[in-house]
Amino acid sequence: MTQPSLKPMRVKFSYLEEQFQDVDLYLNDIKDLVLSADFTLGKALEGFERRFAAHCKMPYAIGVASGTDAIMLSLKILGVGPGDEVITTPNTFIATVGAIAMTGARPVFVDSEGGYVIDPSKIEEGITSRTKAIVPIHYTGNVADMPDIMKIARRYGLYVVEDACQAIGASINGQPIGSWGETACFSVHPLKNLNVWGDGGVIVTRSPELAEKLRLFRNHGLVNRDEAVMFGHNSRLDTLQAVVGNRLIQQLDWITERRIANAQRYDEALGELSDFIRVPKRRADVKHVFHLYMVRAERRNELLAYLHRRGVEAKVHYPIPVHLQKAAAYLGYKEGDFPVAEEDSRTIITLPAHQYLTPDQIDYTIEQIRSFYLNER
Ligand SMILES: *Cc1c(COP(=O)(O)O)cnc(C)c1O
């Protein structure tokens, strides 16, 4: 049995204080932008969209104002709106469901499986004559079972919009996320794997028609300064944020590799604590990018407090599943409707796994978990 480490450490959840030590490089890029006054759309954004698409191995990427808008605009451009239903899972960040609701459509939940993603075997129970689309979430950076989801979507003629806000760089069967559904929606919020200095989002698609329509839709439907072919939103990705993204995207492969390595270190050690910690089954066909390193834990709340006392900033994503939020009351769901998602909300814990953590910090975190279960009885 390992003794608890005597030397306390701080294991932060956020990396933002470390990430921009080379801030002057970014500021110089921004200075160039300001002097060129190329503030809306423009060269930097085109460059970012090209790099983003290349990273996703997809032909088209469209920068928008946020991940939430990426989902909402995708659904709206596909014609989803009032009177329609959209299927998703209740264990997600609130924004997925908010984006669906903001189209005027009704969110319909089905339960998730042990890897925190939608359970394809439950989807058909949620389908009615009003169902228009499925929004699977590649939650935590794990990939929803896209081959099965696409089979169901084809059978019922449903659109699929992938919520990939946590999963840039992920793939299944070697096929990148975003290449399955009509679109995939990414966020570059400061806390996502690829992040900028404020809000931002990106939509990727294989379809040249959808790409063209989305480019118009995010920019008032304008084909040029004076002519609009449809009414639209003002939801462009800020060119200033694209400047930041252009520099940071060069680190994305490194960021992803570091997160995967940290997760493997946790997986190996926590696998030995299987009486107390349940690590999701890792699928060999999935490249999981570990936006969140999430496991189920016995006595979760006690463990969380214990880790906090010892300097480890673990978190819970999230203690209230979306169907039990006040915002969702009008949908009429109740406790017990989604047992897997509800059990998740009571037992999951997210451990720090970001790219700036050292192996020592991961080992320290593991040691605290071990001592919580084995020594503190
Ligand atoms: C972050 C996130 C969103 C929303 O992205 P924003 O850029 O914050 O609007 C949507 N879905 C999931 C799963 C997310 O993690």
Image: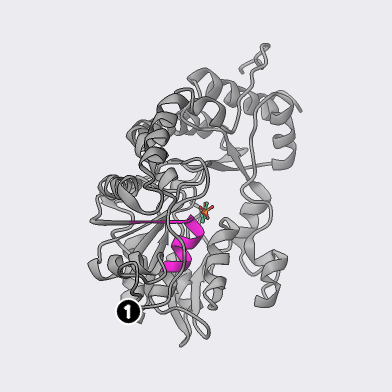
- In front: 345, or 170? 170
Q: Quadrant of residue 290?
A: top left
The reply to whether residue 335 is visible in this rendering is no
Q: Is 57 contained in the magenta span?
A: no
Crowding at dot 1, Cα within 10 Å, few <14 / some 14-19 / many 20+, comes out as few
Above or below: residue 371 compared with residue 295: above
Q: Dividing the image into 4 quarters, which one contains the C terminus? A: top right
Tell me which corner region of the image, top left, top right, bottom left or bottom right, holds residue 58.
Answer: bottom left
Say if residue 254 shows up in the picture. Answer: yes
The amino acid marked with disc number 1 is Arg
User: Which secondary structure, mark 1?
Assistant: helix
Picture quarter containing residue 109?
A: bottom right
Q: Is residue 206 above or below residue 114?
A: below
Name which residue lies at 49% across and 55% down.
Answer: 66
x and y percentages locating residue 325 in the rendered image: 69, 64
Q: Position of residue 312 (x, y in %)?
A: 65, 28
Total tally of numbered discs in the picture: 1
* Left or right position of 28 against 101: left
Q: Residue at x 65, y 47 (%)?
A: 347
Q: Position of residue 39 (x, y in %)?
A: 41, 49
Magenta stretch containing residue 72, yes or no?
yes
Residue sitting at the far top: 6
Q: Which residues are magenta?
A: 62-73
Circle 1 residue: 155
In the picture, measured across the screen, residue 210 lies left or right of residue 241, that is left
Q: Is mark 1 within 8 Å of ligand 1?
A: no
Answer with left or right where residue 126 lies relative to residue 329: left
Residue 67's place in the image compared with 35, above or below, is below
> Among all residues in the image, which is located at the extreme bottom?
129
